[in-house]
Image (tube, rainbow, N blue to C red):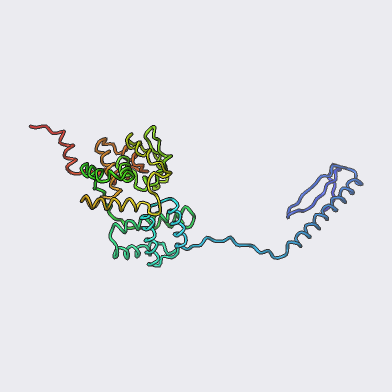
């Protein structure tokens, strides 16, 4: 650092800071004034340097740096939290029990951490599972694992890149072919005519195609009785849809003046499911009928009357029309023959 004079007679300071060279003009040609300014500058620099040294001395004590707590990589602990979330979202007891069953199998096969979830180990796991369970059970197991891993990816527990490297069994999907016939529907209504709550629940499923759990979670304030419509929260797609209902059904729903229209306790869907199973046996109905059959019946009836797969998809609340086509667009051979025959003429 020093005091210098330019060719025009103006004095300036030259000094180094942070390994860089700087020049500061003093804007004066007076040597006496330049010396005073230089002296002041030296004092300020000395003071700053002293304070900096004192500060560094005080900060030389070792600091304890807390490492951020890393999220447990335990696959099981995250799965248990996921189950709690599913229960809080009012999923049916059957679904929750199915997810618990899946976790039990993962533990049994020693899938304990996310590093265990790789193509090599999963391929062996699926082979092992196929020796114990039928395709329907394997299909559910695949769905449970995929749903959880999608959740884990969103939470940052599992890598999206690793997820897309996984391979899952390719199983043929059983297309739902059961449809509740008009005769059977009349038998059902007649048999439960004295059980207003149960009858109204079944009529809701039959006329709207709601999933059983969606009907169960229906609140009184979600029904627009004047316009005969319902705002339904879809647990599967996490979105709302509007469903229209007959006036008679709206009037019956208005009589169920509870926060939740139907019985909704720890039994969940099981209460109505078991009740329907007993009714099915008593009336000697198709053993493959379930509460979900009402949804398929609604979709099939709507498709047969409108022949509009897009309308059916929207009515069911599907996120993708391919889902609708896969499950509900199947036509029986007799149905195809009847429709094609209108083009024929006697000759």
Using the image as rendered, state which of residue 125 and residue 203 is in the foreground: 203
Using the image as rendered, state which of residue 343 and residue 91 is in the foreground: 91
Using the image as rendered, state which of residue 136 and residue 269 is in the foreground: 269
Residue at x 79%, y 60% (from the top left corner): 54
Please state the horizontal and vertical placement of residue 285, each as a whole percent of the image: 21, 50
Residue 124 visible within the image: yes
Count of labels shown? 0
Residue at x 48%, y 57% (from the top left corner): 157
292 lies left or right of 104: left
Furthest toward the right, the residue is 32
Q: Quadrant of residue 227?
A: top left
Furthest toward the front, the residue is 194
Residue at x 49%, y 55% (from the top left corner): 156
Q: Quadrant of residue 250?
A: top left
Task: Check the image and report above or below for 197 versus 117.
Answer: above
Image quadrant holding the C terminus, namely: top left
Using the image as rendered, state which of residue 65 and residue 196 is in the foreground: 196
Please state the horizontal and vertical placement of residue 107, each as a whole percent of the image: 40, 66
76 lies left or right of 275: right
Image quadrant holding the N terminus, namely: bottom right
Task: Check the image and report above or below for 325 versus 271.
Answer: above
Please state the horizontal and vertical placement of residue 297, each as a whole percent of the image: 27, 43
Residue at x 35%, y 63% (from the top left corner): 123
Please state the horizontal and vertical placement of residue 199, each as a whole percent of the image: 30, 44
Task: Check the image and report above or below for 124 versus 276.
Answer: below
Residue 295 visible within the image: no
């Amino acid at each position: 650092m020093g005091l210098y004079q330019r060719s025009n007679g103006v004095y300036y300071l030259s000094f180094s800071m942070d390994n860089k060279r700087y020049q500061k003009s003093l804007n004066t040609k007076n040597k006496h004034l330049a010396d005073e300014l230089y002296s002041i500058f030296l004092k300020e620099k000395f003071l700053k340097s002293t304070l900096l040294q004192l500060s560094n001395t005080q900060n030389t004590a070792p600091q304890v740096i807390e490492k951020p707590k890393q999220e447990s990589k335990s696959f099981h602990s995250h799965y248990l939290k996921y189950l709690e979330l599913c229960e809080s979202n009012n999923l049916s007891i059957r679904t929750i029990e199915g997810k618990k069953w899946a976790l039990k199998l993962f533990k049994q096969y020693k899938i304990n951490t996310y590093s265990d979830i790789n193509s090599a180990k999963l391929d062996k796991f699926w082979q092992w599972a196929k020796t114990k369970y039928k395709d329907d059970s394997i299909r559910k197991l695949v769905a449970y694992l995929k749903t959880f891993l999608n959740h884990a990816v969103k939470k940052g527990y599992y890598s999206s890149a690793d997820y897309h490297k996984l391979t899952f069994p390719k199983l043929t999907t059983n297309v739902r072919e059961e449809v509740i016939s008009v005769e059977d529907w009349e038998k059902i209504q007649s048999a439960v005519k004295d059980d207003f709550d149960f009858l109204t629940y079944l009529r809701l499923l039959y006329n709207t195609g709601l999933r059983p759990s969606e009907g169960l979670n229906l609140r009184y304030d979600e029904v627009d009785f004047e316009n005969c419509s319902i705002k339904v929260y879809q647990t599967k797609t996490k979105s709302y849809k509007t469903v229209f209902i007959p006036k008679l059904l709206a009037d019956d729903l208005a009589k169920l003046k509870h926060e939740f229209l139907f019985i909704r306790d720890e039994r969940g869907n099981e209460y109505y499911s078991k009740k329907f199973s007993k009714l099915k046996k008593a009336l000697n109905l198709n053993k493959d009928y379930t509460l979900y059959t009402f949804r398929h019946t609604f979709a099939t009836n709507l498709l047969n009357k409108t022949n509009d797969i897009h309308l059916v998809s929207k009515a069911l609340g599907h996120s993708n029309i391919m889902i609708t086509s896969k499950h509900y667009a199947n036509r029986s051979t007799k149905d195809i023959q009847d429709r094609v025959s209108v083009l024929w003429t006697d000759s």
